[in-house]
Structure formats: C-alpha cells, structure tokens
Image (cartoon, helix red, strand yellow):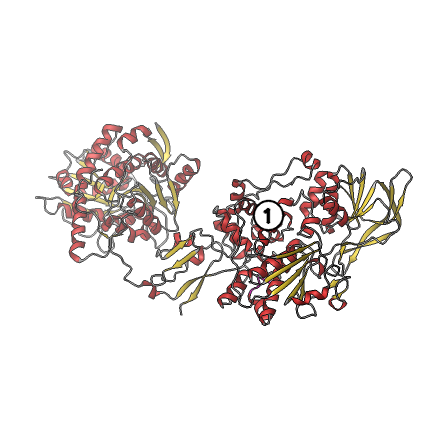
Amino acid sequence: MEIKYDSSSELVIPISYGSSEAIETGKWGFEKPEAAFLTAPCQEVCPAGNPIPQFLYFAGEGRYQEAVEALLRENPFPGVCGRVCFHPCERDCNRSQYDEAVSINAMERHVFDVTSNRHPDILPLSNNVNSRRVAVVGSGPAGLSAAYFLRLLGHRVTLFETRKELGGVMRWGIPEYRLPKSILKKEIKRILQLSIEVTTGMTVGKEIFFEALDRFDAVFLSPGAGLSLSLGIEGEDLKKVWRGGDFLDRINSGDKFRIGKEIIVVGGGNTAMDVARAALRRGSKVTVAYRRTRTEMPAIRDEIHDAEEEGVRFEFLLQPVKISFLTNKKIRVKFQRMKLRGRDQSNRPKAIPIKGEYVTRDADGLIKAVGEGVDLSWIPETLSTKGLIAVNPSLATSHPKIFAGGDAVDQPRTIVTAIGAGKRAAIAIDLYLGGYSDDDIFSKIRVGHKGALSMEAYLSGRNGGSWSEAKEIISYPQLNTLFFEHSKKVGMSKLDRKKALKSFSEVNLGFNSDEARMSALRCFSCGTCNYCYNCYYFCPEGVVSLDPQHRIRRVDLEHCKGCGTCAKVCPRSGVLMKEAG
Amino acid sequence: MKEFITGNHAVARAVRLCRTPLIAAYPITPQTPIYEKLSEWEASGELKGIMMRTESEHSAMASCIAASLTGVRTFTATSSQGLALMHEMLHFAAGCRVPVVMANVNRLLAAPWGFWADQLDSLSQRDTGWIQLYCENGQESLDSVIQAYKIAEEVFLPAMVCLEAFVVSHFMEPVDVPDQEQVDRFLPPLDLPHRFDIDKPGYLVPVVPPELYRKYKHMAQTSMNAVKEIADRVDREYREAFGRGYGIIEPFMLEDAEIVIVTAGSITSTARITIKRLREQGHRVGLLKLRLFRPFPVEEIQQALAGKKKIAVIDRNISLGSGGIFCQELRAALVHSSDHPLTFSYIAGVGGTDVDPDVIEKIALDVMKRREPVDTPMWIME
C-alpha cells in the first residue's frame, strides 16, 4: 500500500538493527530462576520407579525410541508391566484430582509395542574395573531384573533356572490373554543380549549344590513362591481339585487337559481371576467363592471387572470346609457362611464364621487359589524365617554375600515390586562388591519415599561421582491448573467378548497412534519440563531459550531481571526463584 | 437498515463492519457495552477478529500497538480513568505511527468519583498525537469509526472517536447500519507495513539522538497537518457512499448570523433546537459544531466565523486555571484573523449536568447583552 506522507526510502519510525545485549540488565535482578526438578507422585508410587512424566513426554512428541529407552533405564519389562501391572501410578496420578488419571499403564504398553519390532534396545554397559561374578537363582521378574541391572553395572552374571524356559511367574503364572508369550520372549531376548550366562533345567539344591554358589562373589536368590497353599480341609486331595498354580502352569504349558463343565474357584486374588478366566476359555462355567466381600478382594480392579464381564460369577462370604465326591462324577463343596468383623493384623476386615450356617454347591471341579508358599527346602535354615527368606531393607540376608528378593521375601507379590527388588538388589550387590555402605547412597537415589530407587541417579553418582539430593514430591496444589484443559481418559479397545472366550488371544488391544498421542499429551508432566514454552512466551525480557530436542532449558542470566514470571506461569512448578548469589 | 440501538452498540457494529482482526480492551463504565457486545459476537462467531481481554487499559493499548505493527487493523475502547491509565501508551501509539482506532466514551475524571458525561478525559489527551473526532449521537459515532480507520490508515497516526457517557453511549436511537458489502467497498481489507521481520530482527523505536527525535516529531506533525484535508475528503466520499456526512466542522444557520454558539458533541443537537427557536424570535444566531479537534481546523474555523460579532463557546470540560478547552483552542485559532469576534467561554454540562435548550438560550441571550471581553470562563450553575 501507499504510504503517502512518508516516502518509503525514509522510515516512518526508527528501527535499530544493532543488539542491545551489551546492556547487562541482569545485574538489576535480585532473584534468579532456577530449573526445579520434582518427582511426580505416579513415579514415587511405582515400585520400579518408572520415569513416567519423562517417557510420556517423549511419547507425546512421537519420540518413541527415547521413550522406551527412558523406561529401560529403570525397568527391563515395559512390555510386561504395560500389560499386567496393577498400576498404582494411575491411582496417585495428580490429574485424577483434576478430571481423570492419565492412561499410564496402557501408554507403557504402547511405547513397548511400537518399538519392539525395531531392533531390540540395548543400553550401554558401564565400565566397571571391579567387575565380579554374580549368581542369580530364579528367572522371574526379580531374578531377570537383578541380572539385567547387574550387567548394566558391569558385573558378570550367571542365571540359574529350574525350568526349561525363563520368565518364572510371567511365563507360567499369567495366562496368554493377559500376557502373550511372544511379548515376554522379546523382553527376555533383549535382556539376554547383555551377555548373561544362562543355565536352564538345573535346580539349585538338586543338580547343583547350594554350596556350589560359593564360587561366585555374590548371590541373588529369587526363587519365587511356587507352592500353592492348601485349604487344610477334608477332600482337597480329590482328583477334581486343582491347585491354582498347577492349573495355570498346565494351561501355560499348552496342556489340553479336561476340566469339566462347572468349576468353583476359591480365592480373591489375581491368581483366582487368572484361573477363573482361563477356565472360562476352556469352556467351563465358573463361580468364584471368596471369604470376604468384593471390596476386600486383593485382585486388580480391572481384572475383577473383566472377569465379571466375561461371565464369571461371584459368591462372597463363603469359606470351603469340606469337599466330597458324588456318584455322578461331580463333587460337592460345603461352605461355611462368613461375616466381616473387626480387622486383622494387616488392617483388613476379618472374616469370621457365622455359627451353624452352611451352604453346599455341586460342581465338576474346584481350583484352589488361596495364595502361594515358598519352597525353602534347598536353602540353609539360617537364611529363612516364617516361611520366607529373611532380608533387611537392602535385601541382604544374614550371609554377607547372599541377597534375596521377589515373592520369596516379605514384600507385596506383584511383578513390578519384584522388578523393583531386582534393581535394589543389583545396587546393593554392587555396593557390597565395591566395599561401600549403602545407607547413605540409598537415600540419595530414592524416588520419593515409597521405596523405589533410581538407577539413573545411581549410575550418574557412581560413574560421574556427582550424587544429587533426592527430589521432593510435587503435590496437586503445586500445579497451576489454569493452563490445563479438561479431557477424558482414553481407554483401550478390547477384543470382542465372544472371540475372547474362544481362545487365549490377548484381550486388551492397545492404543492406535492417535489414542496414544492423546493419552500422552494428557500428562501434566508434574515437576518435569515438557517444553510447553509458557516461560518462553511469558518472559518479558525474552531471555529464556529452550531446546526440546536435547532437553535443554536456559536462561540468559546476564539479561534476566529476575521478575519471576517464568516461575509463576510454569504449570508444573518447574522453576524456582532463588536469591542471586 | 435502521436499527434501534445505543451509541455503544453503534460503535461495536462499526468495528465489526470494519473487520478488525484484533481488539484489545479492558471494561470500564460507560464503555463496557462495547466490550460486551464485541465479546458476545466473538463467542457467536459473528466477529471475525480476536477479542483480547487485557489486564489493564495500558496493556490494551500496548497490545493494539504491537498488533498494528504486525500489519493488522486494531481497535480498543475505553473511558475516563482507563484513558488516563493509557496515557503513556497513547504517546507510544503516535510515536510508533500506528493507525489504531479507539472509541472513548467521555466520562468525568475522578476525584470525586462519578460516571457522568464530561469531555475532560479525552481533551486531557490532546497533546498525545492522536486524531480526535467528537460525535453528536450514535449514528455519527458509527460513521466516525469507519471514517477514522480510513483517515488513520492513510497518515499512520492513531485516531480517537469520542462520544459522551450515557447521553450518547446508552441512549437508544434509530441508527442506519450500513451493509457489509458497502463498508467493504469503502474500507477494503488492508495490509499495513509489517514492522517485525523474523529474518531481520530489529528493535523498534529505540533511543535516538536529539536531532533524530526532532526529525520524527516533525514528520509526524507534517502527517498530522495533512489530516484536515484527508478527513474532509474521506467525509465527502462517505457521503457519496452512504448518503451521510458531517464535515470536519459543521455550520448551522451561520450565514447571516451575528452571534455564534460553538459546541462539540451531544450539546450540538440540543443547540440546534435553541437556535431555531431564537431565529423564530428574530435573533440572528447561528451554530458551529466542532467535530475534528486534532488536528484543529484553524483555517476552516477562521473562514466560518469571519465577520461574526460574538462567539459563545460552550465547554463540557474545564481546564482548571484556564477555562473551557474548546474555547482556548478557538481563541488561539482566531487570534490572527483580522477583525476577529469577541469570544466568550461558558462552562456548561460539567460532570454530566444537563444542558437543555433553556440553558443554551440563556447563554445566547447573555452573549447578546455583553459589550466587553471577559477573560475568565462563565459557569452555568443550574
């Protein structure tokens, strides 16, 4: 357009193309911003200490390779955990106080799924001049995790497994419809690529003497809890009564045994749900009998829900007292009716019998899923107490070089707790072999206050010599929720029920790329910079620079006047104002 | 099509018709209905621009300046204290040579507190380098906003359209709202110079040495001087396109008048009635309406008042220690014309007090009696 009263050769307003950077306006400032790093509650509550905001940030950006690498630094089993974890992270997700939790569990699975068909990821092994030999007994989640992290720490590992295949409870205890064997295989393959010596089909205490472990510099025992507990009632040894563990083992071995039309499952934990849903897939009608009520069931809520959706019936406040054989090849189970009164030692409502009230149920079979015990027959008596291997918080036994973890010690029996134990043991063993005390180190590498440890913090401390202090937890009120928008949690689609019940195909179908992106972007990134650029946009001095690719945020302190706007507008408390030194 | 709407809504309609992509404003009584109406249209999608709700009028003006420097048409509306708060940025707007258009609803300035019609708020900003237009009613407010864009965008200076609190802003009158196509033809979409170039970053209006500052001020003054001619031409073009026009000043029954009442804003409408009444009584009285205040149309006023005996300027404002501001300007304009008339300053309507036909008649009759010049302003206190 024509600028009538100002010739175009003569600027109508002055413009300077020189830099004003020469003026060090930063000297006027009193406070300066500092990058703050806080731990999100999801991460704190994860027994494996998964870097959740970090991996979700990468996933949201479509940087899946970095996402899976972030997970693999802390957890060798994202594909397994993304399917079978009880995901306390979602319960503690700050977003659940705003609208609905982020689908963390499904995202972990998605990150694994989209990267697993590329080359398997191998993290660099750290150089360790003090490399020693460590034996790991048992290849469940605790054993394999310990082996994995010990390798990352540079030790040589020999893994002993009684069965012909590795995986422990992940291989033999969880049915295919929840955890396909192909997924487990991929995870184990990646771990074994770290050069772990494996001995399968050999039992320590039988083919290998326990004393033979003495030639190793340290030992980690993770035999798991493979013995199904008995009910202690008349008739439980009848032919049509199975142990839950054995039942799942046979299912997972591909054994085509007959189980009968109507089945009663006794128990309320995850094994009971797995057994019930597996039996459904073998064409049985299934009733779960539990001695408390639905609220007290220890199984994962989603599992209970899915079991019910698939047609499992539930009967509560029933405890079997006698099983007898009927003439028509059926069995009859006599149940004592129970009621809830008071609380037990673990603060759960106690089930007590209602005197004289019994019911009977006829069935073609009964599966006991009332808990598992540990086979301690091969372990020196001095190492055990109350049916478990006795350990201290560093997972050390009374024998200086023997450590133990997983279901065989006193800890919650979940896959992810076992993974966390594997990590903790690997660090404890590394410290032991290096001749260091662990108390101080554990407090520096903790992820919050709920027991998880950070391998990344440990490696950077051990290899780089810089031990940072543990980060604080970011609570919901510390978020600046004005910058967020409400949205619904994204759910996974499921296999059609009719199809699901005809086979052991995986029920949960995972996310498509849009669902995954949407889910990942729902993460508030509590306490972690996700490059939302708020500080950059709002900085009145234009002194903030961000590099999401290399995860760098910088403030030009020579020109930052310390107004604190960046700290105020950070939605996730990621900037702290501190008096300038 | 004629619509029965308030002055505020007439302004809002004009802004919508001008397809202003960025509006930045802060609500203040009695301007708020402009803000609300534009917000409402933004929500319904009828307004094609962005309604930016800033935290203060100062920021509103800063936003308009910045947006205008990116090349788009901008608008803001305010009143009284809000305008006072903008003061610093008003100078910036003129210095940055941005054709921002603003509606100012004339409201008294505190203290004491009040919301009533008074022109002191915008007159206090007369030296900020803004073009100023004073409107009689809703129709003129609508038409002036459209005209203001055309004038401002030609000279790269900001323009303020003033309408008085309540008597114009809130009174409903039939207003002829032009068609969108008509307005589009009159005021086509524009692309102002883009002052921000990502590929060649520069610092706008930096520190300049004294000579350069003087040069830019001089350039701005040259542009400002051109406004009278442009405003007059734009008004004529507007009349051709829409059948209405106002001129930069408007004489009414002036030809054979000996005594002239001078007004600006809504008092003009009332004064027309009084003038007719006095004419019927045989008095040779005329009226001169001032519409363009900055730049002040000195030659046009000299011509219009040549040969008149006495002038009564009615000011709805007071510059303490001096007098009515329109009167000061008028006296200064006439000082070099030969045989210039005696000029009397009347302060009426300050603080929103009513100026009815009787008040104006009283002023006219008072002027007729006077033979000697009076330097101090005369207050109408009823």
Examine the structure image and report whether residue B47 is included in the region drawn in magenta.
no
Majority secondary structure in the magenta region: loop
Residue B20 in percent (x, y) is at: 33, 38
Residue A58 in percent (x, y) is at: 49, 50
Instruction: Choose between A458 and B335: the one closer to the eye.
Output: A458
Is A159 rendered above or below residue A295?
below
- Point out the residue furthest to the front here: A207
Query: In the rendered structure, the residue with mark 1 lies on which chain?
Result: A
Instruction: Choose between A41 and A268: the one closer to the eye.
Output: A268
* Quadrant, the N terminus of chain B: top left
Query: Disc 1 marks which residue?
Result: A186
Do we see residue B382 in this rendering? no
Is B328 rendered above or below residue A286?
below
- Point out the residue furthest to the right here: A327
Q: Is residue B344 left or right of residue A437?
A: left
- Point out the residue furthest to the left here: B338
Do we see residue A206 in this rendering? yes
- Quadrant position of residue B103: top left
Residue A312 in percent (x, y) is at: 75, 40
- Quadrant position of residue A378: bottom right
Residue A96 in percent (x, y) is at: 58, 50
Determine whether the residue tagged by mark 1 lies in a helix, strand or loop: helix
- Which residue: 88% across, 39% down? A329
Q: Is residue A158 left or right of residue A26?
A: right
Q: Is residue A308 left or right of residue B202?
A: right
Question: Which stretch is magenta?
Answer: A445-449
Instruction: Choose between B302 and A212: the one closer to the eye.
Output: A212
Instruction: Choose between A571 and A168: the one closer to the eye.
Output: A168
Q: Tally the marks.
A: 1
Crowding at mark 1 (Cα within 10 Å: few <14, some 14-19, many 20+)? some
Q: Is residue B3 left or right of residue B343?
A: right
The amino acid type of the residue labelled 1 equals Lys
